[in-house]
Image: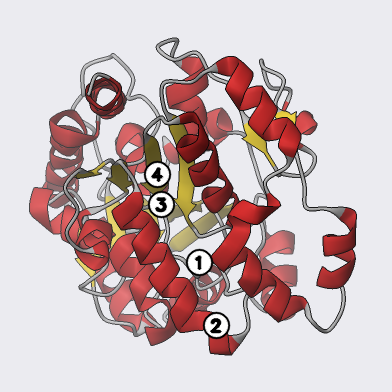
Amino acid sequence: MTFYRHFVEKKDFNIIVATNSPNVEKFHLPYQPIRFDLPKWWRRLSNTRLHPWIAGFQSLHGEWLLPKHVMDAASQFQPDVVFTMAGSWDWTALAARKVAKKLGVPLVASFNDWYDYPWFRGHPSQRQAIENRFKRFYREADLALCTSEGMREELGPHPNAHVWYPSGAAMPDTPLQKICFDQSITQSYTVLFGGSLGEWHGPMLEELVNVCKSQNLPIRFRFFGSLATWSPAFDKMVRESGIYGGHIPFEQLANEAATADVLLLLMGFDPSVAHIQRTSFKTKFLDYLTFRRPILVWGPEYCSAIRTAREFDSAECVTEPAADQCVKALWNLIGRKEKKEQLIQNAEAMYHDRFHPDKIHQKILDEIFALSCR
């Protein structure tokens, strides 16, 4: 979505888009993408027990799989630069590098996720080689755009690497009004989560609800999103009780958030996802800023969301993995009117200081213009 906001909704670039994404037509795009895929015989090999090795080869030598019609279209278009998404890692990044090299134009690579997110596709014996190829691709890019400070730190030195945050929603133009938080202890407070319910999110939300129920706290949860990974029993309960509202449009989510007492942002604690937490930056955090409600981030100290929240004091931070500690902090925050008001003010300051969509867009304009003028 962030690339759509920069390259399509804004009118500063003339683009052609080549993609291997299936069913891209369902998005009703205002342009006609150039579709490509792996050769049929290669796909047949991928459906055999050789699949891990095939996937690994793609991650190491994907430039050999570039279809001729994509190269022909790029040559006819004569771009000033070639832009690709390098993380999470996919063979198409290597194909994009081949296009840039053949046309003699700079390569711009955006590193949004670590190479093995959301899963590693190659054979385990290839892991180190693929990680090395990912890092070398970073060094080869003429302009490397890192989604967070953590990503740039992990990838290392580069003569033209910059932190380029994802672009969230725009904040309403209306001035921030002082929000009255009802302090009545008899009411039910609403805590909202909106976004992907996959991976660590589902189990963490399940733990929170169960702890709150065991303590009989008057907290009403509302969850919106898809791909939930919580248990079947919990899924049945949240659907029947109205806690889970399914996947809804962004505008509807904003309306739901307007009545919430706290917005939740969850980052995984498991060591297996530590690299992801250090290097990624959740667009959800930026969208939350525009809702003008208090935010609570539950995640490890090293994750990008906690680092940024602490810098601006824009969210309550819980860095203990135990759900009861998060519930305790959540309940304490609900009861602190002044703290909630201060968090909202600080979140708006954070938005205007570094995360306004216009500032993020100007960054990509300036860097690509500087690159194309070399």
Asked whether the beta carbons under mark 1 and mark 3 sit within 8 Å of each other, the answer is no
Q: CA distance from mark 1 to mark 3?
A: 10 Å
Q: Where's residue 57, x and y in %? A: 64, 70
The residue singled out by tag 3 in the image is 112
Q: CA distance from mark 4 to mark 3?
A: 9 Å
Does residue 229 appear in the picture of this structure? no
Q: Residue at point 78% right, 30% down?
A: 25
Q: Amino acid at mark 1?
A: Tyr
Q: Secondary structure at mark 2?
A: helix
Position of residue 233 in the picture relative to residue 304 (left or right): right
Q: Amino acid at mark 2?
A: Gln
Q: CA distance from mark 4 to mark 1?
A: 17 Å
Sequence-earlier tag: 2 or 1? 1
Observer-nearest residue: 288 or 163? 163
Instruction: Report crowding for label 3: few under 14, some 14 to 19, many 20 or more residues within 10 A (C-alpha).
Output: many
Q: Residue at point 47% right, 36% down?
A: 100
Circle on res. 109: 4
Farthest residue, direction bottom = 125
Position of residue 282 in the picture relative to residue 46 (left or right): left
The residue singled out by tag 1 in the image is 117
Instruction: Report crowding for label 4: few under 14, some 14 to 19, many 20 or more residues within 10 A (C-alpha).
Output: many
Sequence-earlier tag: 4 or 1? 4
Q: Which image quadrant is residue 259 in?
A: top left
Q: Can you tell which of label 3 and label 2 is closer to the viewer? A: 2
Q: Where's residue 168, x and y in %? A: 38, 35
The residue singled out by tag 2 in the image is 126
Asked whether the beta carbons under mark 4 and mark 3 sit within 8 Å of each other, the answer is no
Farthest residue, direction top = 11
Q: Can you tell which of label 4 and label 3 is closer to the viewer? A: 4
Q: Secondary structure at mark 3?
A: loop
